[in-house]
Image (cartoon, rainbow, N blue to C red):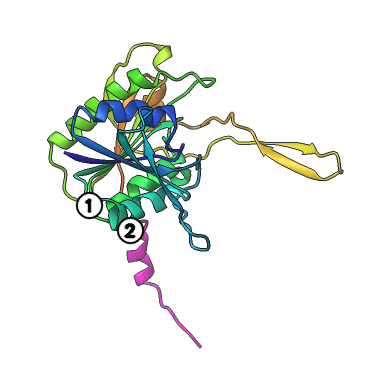
Amino acid sequence: MRILLTNDDGIYAPGLRALRAELLKLGTVTVVAPATEQSAAGHSVTLLTPLLVNEVYEDDATTFVGWAVEGRPADCVKLALLELLPEPPDVIISGMNAGSNAGINVLYSGTVAAAIEGAFYHHTAIAVSLEYDKKIYDFPTAAKYARQVIEQILARNPTKGSLFNVNLPVLEHGPIRGIRVMPQNVSPYTERFDRRVNPRGRTYFWTNPEFTCPDPHPDTDVTALSESYITVTPLQFDLTDHAKMEQLKKWEWKVE
């Protein structure tokens, strides 16, 4: 199996390293990932500056890992598919992200955006993220669970362009209770900014990293994740509200 691995935390992130080690059990793995962290980059792409690319090797300086790209996660997938890979991959994996991408985080996530970009090109794509608690991560163990989930998805031979969002709970909170297929929670998170003043008297703001979902709903990915379940959510990138579109077609539209 030919696997393209990317992320938004950067090519040297421990989550990517751990997931790569597990994915090598399934086939050949080529990494094309951002040279630096691109968290919350969403589906942005680079248009006005060149995309610099460097080859990356293991510590032994002889084992080729892949390419570091001075760009966004979506840029990485585009370059991989259109320029860098000699053959198309059988699957595209994005992750393993440091922090969950459940709920509306899907809309901000560079990890999920990279997987969406792969699905654009009709490849099966899977985003993988690990929830954290005060920056506690057990990436190697989480990667083993992630690989098992990925294997089960691929064993069903999903149609080309299938897109999956996988989230793993904080492992330190207790044993994994299982895998649940859940819809995305769409409730807004409670967020706040820290207001400060710099030495020159200018006001500036820091986004506070601690935010919660005040309305998680019992049957969504956010709640299942908090209950120590691995969540799998099938996604699509057609944002059309088809039900409302049928209503709009019945309006009497006019121009004068």
- Residue type, label 1: Pro
User: Residue at the bottom extreme?
Assistant: 256
Would residue 169 be counted in the magenta stretch?
no
Would residue 241 be counted in the magenta stretch?
yes
- Residue type, label 2: Ala
Task: Please state which of the two labelled residues, at mark 1 or mark 2, is closer to the viewer.
Answer: 1
207 sits to left or right of 94: right
- For residue 217, say whether it is visible: no
Does residue 159 lie above or below 17 as drawn?
below
210 sits to left or right of 76: right
Q: Kindly identify the residue that appears in the image at 36 percent across and 31 percent down.
A: 58
Does residue 237 lie above or below 195 as drawn?
below
Q: Kindly identify the residue that appears in the image at 52 percent across and 60 percent down.
A: 49
Q: Kindly identify the residue that appears in the image at 23 percent across and 30 percent down.
A: 24
Of the numbered discs 1 and 2, the one sitting upstream in the chain is 1
- Residue 174 in picture, x, y percent from top left: 38, 11
Does residue 180 lie above or below 4 as drawn?
above
Does residue 21 lie above or below 54 as drawn?
above
- Residue 70 in picture, x, y percent from top left: 48, 49
Residue located beneath label 1 in the image: 86
State the image quarter where residue 216 is shown. Answer: top left
Is the residue marked by circle 1 packed among few (<14), some (14-19), or many (20+) residues within 10 Å?
Answer: few
Q: Are marks 1 and 2 in contact (CB under 8 Å)?
A: no
Is the residue marked by circle 2 packed among few (<14), some (14-19), or many (20+) residues within 10 Å?
Answer: few
The label number, if any, that marks residue 243 in the structure image: 2
- Residue 63 in picture, x, y percent from top left: 30, 33
